[in-house]
Image (cartoon, rainbow, N blue to C red):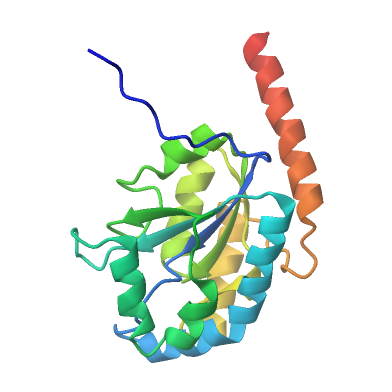
Amino acid sequence: MKSRKHAQTRPSPVPVALLLIDVLTTFQFPDGDAILQGALTMRDALVRLKARAREAGIPVLYVNDNFGDWRSEKEVLMGRCLEAKGTSFVRPLLPDSNDYFVLKPLHSAFYMTPLEVLLKHLQVETLILAGLTSNSCITVTAHDANMRGYDIYIPPDCSCARNAEEHTQALRQLEATAGANLRRSTVLKLSNLIRAAEISQRSGSARSSG
């Protein structure tokens, strides 16, 4: 029997990944209007962060709810979001063929998804978390990432909650309990993140070989 060929996904050129969490959404849920307002406020910063990540060779991974529809494909999901009230937020952030896409059934990007396997294959050490929302899916994902030993960055200007108070409280809690770095995207030097992650990666390899 011939063995199956694996998908031609190569390790990332850098050990850092940008996770965009639930940015493809219809905002048709309780508090959707309030979250949309916050999302529009941080949209441009998020668009710029993705562009900078692409320039730096950092892989961009979309991790998104499947809205309970296990038969949906990425294109169907995008079409549904573009027809909803949040299209002005979603349209500038649509994934392209260079991005990775993972569907999740519940809040955490790690729970019952192939994300951990993908990150190991990409040889990622550091995660930048952005998207929706800071006090829900980003919070749960950050704790799961922390338990798995990833360094975590959550730019406050690239995520939101229902209001500024909830957003600030959630991020402070993640800083205290999950070791999240809360540097704003405007001062986040991706080259420094990459360099630090590469040093960590080499140190880990040396410990393993020793």
Q: Choose between 209 and 101: the one closer to the eye.
A: 101
Look at 47% across and 34% down and name the residue there.
Answer: 8
**Picture coordinates of residue 104 (x, y %)?**
32, 56
> Which quarter of the rendered picture does the C terminus lie within?
top right
Q: Choose between 60 and 173: the one closer to the eye.
A: 60
Give above or below for 150 relative to 25.
above
Look at 46% across and 59% down and name the residue there.
Answer: 62
Give above or below for 92 relative to 183.
below
Which corner quadrant of the image does residue 32 belong to? bottom left
Look at 58% across and 42% down and name the residue there.
Answer: 150
Q: Is residue 134 visible?
A: no
Left or right: 207 in relation to 130: right
Give above or below for 174 relative to 158.
above
Give above or below for 2 relative to 136.
above
Left or right: 70 in relation to 172: left
Q: Is residue 137 visible?
A: yes
**Picture coordinates of residue 24 (x, y %)?**
41, 71
> Which quarter of the rendered picture does the N terminus lie within?
top left
Look at 28% across and 63% down and name the residue there.
Answer: 66
**Picture coordinates of residue 193 (x, y %)?**
75, 48
